[in-house]
Amino acid sequence: MSVAGVRGEIEAGGALALRREQGQAWSVCIVRWVRSDLPGQVEVGLQIIGQSFHPVMVGFRGRAVQQLSPALALPIMEPLRRHPAMLAVAGSYASRRFVFVRETQTVYVAQARALGLDLQTPSVELFQYEIDPYPI
């Protein structure tokens, strides 16, 4: 793979999205390792965690309303993940119950229950969730 014209910093534990061609869906990945033997060339080890995503805002119970954090809602990814998941900024996950807001042409608000923290790096947290059947 070759990427041109991209500026920024790639570090292990970060998240990025890739696609083969314009118009195709984005694959969400976690950077597992980064290596550079030649100037201007970088090798990256990636773990795919989602074949698509929706941007959302998440807010955890016990935190102030002002502390909504950006996240990506990821679909089920059998056989690795049997529930949908959220990829959030590190430090967002604070309790099992949270709400998320998805804005498209309409606004969707749901209360959900985290099923546990699947992955945590200095940059991001990945956790599976289910819509809470007993909202408060």
Image (cartoon, rainbow, N blue to C red):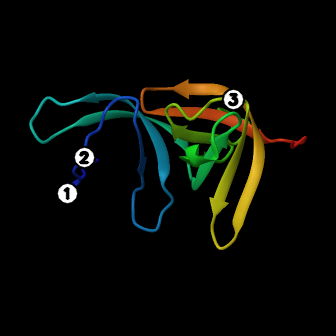
Residue at 63% across / 33% down in the picture? 127
Q: Which residue is mark 2?
A: 8
Secondary element at tag 1:
loop
Kindly report which numbered mark, 3 or 2, lies closer to the viewer in this rendering: 3
Q: Give the image quarter of residue 83.
A: top right
* Real-space CA distance between mark 2 and mark 1, rounded to the nearest whole angstrom: 10 Å
Outermost residue, bottom side: 105
* Real-space CA distance between mark 3 and mark 1, rounded to the nearest whole angstrom: 40 Å
Residue 81 shows in this picture? no
For badge 1, the amino acid type reads Gly
Q: Which residue is mark 3?
A: 95
Quarter of the figure that contains the C terminus: top right
For badge 3, the amino acid type reads Ser
Identify which residue, 19 or 6, lies in the foreground: 6
Residue 61 sits above or below residue 26 on the image: above
Left or right, residue 3 beside residue 131: left
Question: Measured from the top left, where is residue 97 in percent x and y?
Answer: 75, 35
Question: Measured from the top left, where is residue 123 in percent x and y?
Answer: 42, 33
Outermost residue, right side: 134
Residue 133 sits above or below residue 96 on the image: below
Left or right, residue 27 beside residue 101: left
Outermost residue, left side: 39
Identify which residue, 108 or 82, lies in the foreground: 108
Question: Measured from the top left, where is residue 133 in percent x and y?
Answer: 89, 42
Q: Which residue is mark 1?
A: 5
Residue at 73% across / 56% down in the picture? 109
